[in-house]
Amino acid sequence: MMGANWQWSFAKGRADRLAAELRHYHTGQPAGEPGLHSHDGTMQSQYHRGWSSPSPVEIYQHIHHPNPPRK
C-alpha cells in the first residue's frame, strides 16, 4: 500500500509537469525533465511517475481549459 508521502510525491510530480507544460505554452521555455524532488529513492521514483503520468489530452485540457465547469 502506498504511503501518504508517496502519494504526495506522485501528485507533486504531476502538478509540476502540468505547470511546466503551461509555462512552455506561454513562454516557449522547454518543459524539461523532472528534477530532484527527494534523495529518497522511492519518493523520487513516485515523483518521476507523477511527472510522466499526464496524457497529451490531459496536458491539452490543462492548457486550454484550466478550470472546467463542475457538474
Image (cartoon, rainbow, N blue to C red):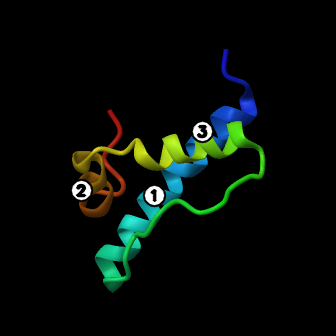
Does residue 9 sit above or below 36 in this rendering? above
User: Where residue 30 sits: x, y (%)?
Assistant: 37, 76
Tell me the residue that label 1 is attached to: 17
Describe residue 51's horizontal placement relative to residue 25 as left or right. Answer: right
Kind of residue indicated by mark 3:
Gln
What is the C-alpha distance between the residues marked 1 and 2? 12 Å
Residue at horizontal 24 percent and vertical 50 percent from the top? 56
Q: Nearer the viewer, residue 65 or 13?
A: 13
Residues at discs 1 and 2 in contact (Cβ within 8 Å): no
* Badge nearest the viewer, 3 or 2: 3
Residue at horizontal 67 percent and vertical 14 percent from the top? 1
The mark tally for this picture is 3
Q: Nearer the viewer, residue 62 or 31?
A: 31
Name the mark on residue 60: 2
Could you tell me which secondary element the residue under label 3 belongs to?
helix
Does residue 27 sit above or below 23 in this rendering? below
What is the C-alpha distance between the residues marked 1 and 3? 13 Å
Does residue 4 sit above or below 39 in this rendering? above
Kind of residue indicated by mark 2:
Tyr
Q: Residues within 10 Å of mark 3 (few under 14, many from 20)?
A: many
Tell me the residue that label 3 is attached to: 46
